[in-house]
Image: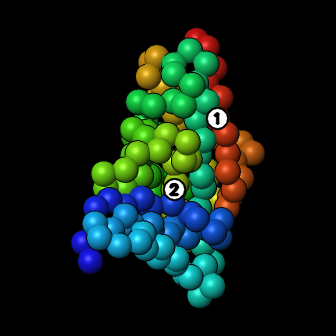
Amino acid sequence: MTSRSSVIFDLDEDGDLDIVTNEMVGRPQVLVSNLSEKKPIHFLKVKLAGTVSNRDGLGATVKVRAGAKTYTRYHDGKSGYLSQSSSLPLYFGLGEADKADRIEVTWPSGTKQTLTENIPANALLEIIERPR
């Protein structure tokens, strides 16, 4: 079989990423990861809500600092090959860190927003754009 497109997201809400493919001449395949059953998964899902920028925060850059590492994602709405979904949250695997220490969002409007307190681990965090 030949995959036409794929999307990567946490289908079963267990913290690890799963894959769904669209096949050229067959039914879609669903590849469910069971990594969370083998070891603890530390992650953070970030959903952006623009107020000055567009409502989904498309075009924003999000940096998450966890321990000694910084993870950066550009929110372009893509989550796989030849697929698009702006409704999916940005996913940050935190490695061995059991919490995020800091989140920086640079919105398309140019506004920069920083969070350093009450950042939940292993959860979905909605960040609403603050006007300048």
Residue at numbered disc 2: 92
Q: Name the residue: 44% across, 61% down.
A: 8
* Residue 42 appears in the figure: no
Q: Name the residue: 56% across, 82% down.
A: 34
Residue at numbered disc 1: 127
Q: Name the residue: 44% across, 22% down.
A: 108
Q: Which mark is residue 23?
A: none
| Disc on the earlier residue, 1 or 2 | 2
Residue that sits furthest to the left in the current view:
2
For residue 28, above or below residue 37: above
Q: Name the residue: 71% across, 53% down.
A: 120
Between the residue at mark 1 and the residue at mark 2, the CA separation in whole angstroms equals 14 Å
Position of residue 110 in the picture relative to residue 41 (left or right)? left
User: Crowding at label 1, few (<14), some or many (≥20) Cα neighbours within 10 Å?
Assistant: some
Near-viewer residue (101 or 42): 42
Amino acid on which disc 2 is placed: Phe
For residue 126, above or below residue 96: above
Q: Secondary structure at mark 2?
A: strand
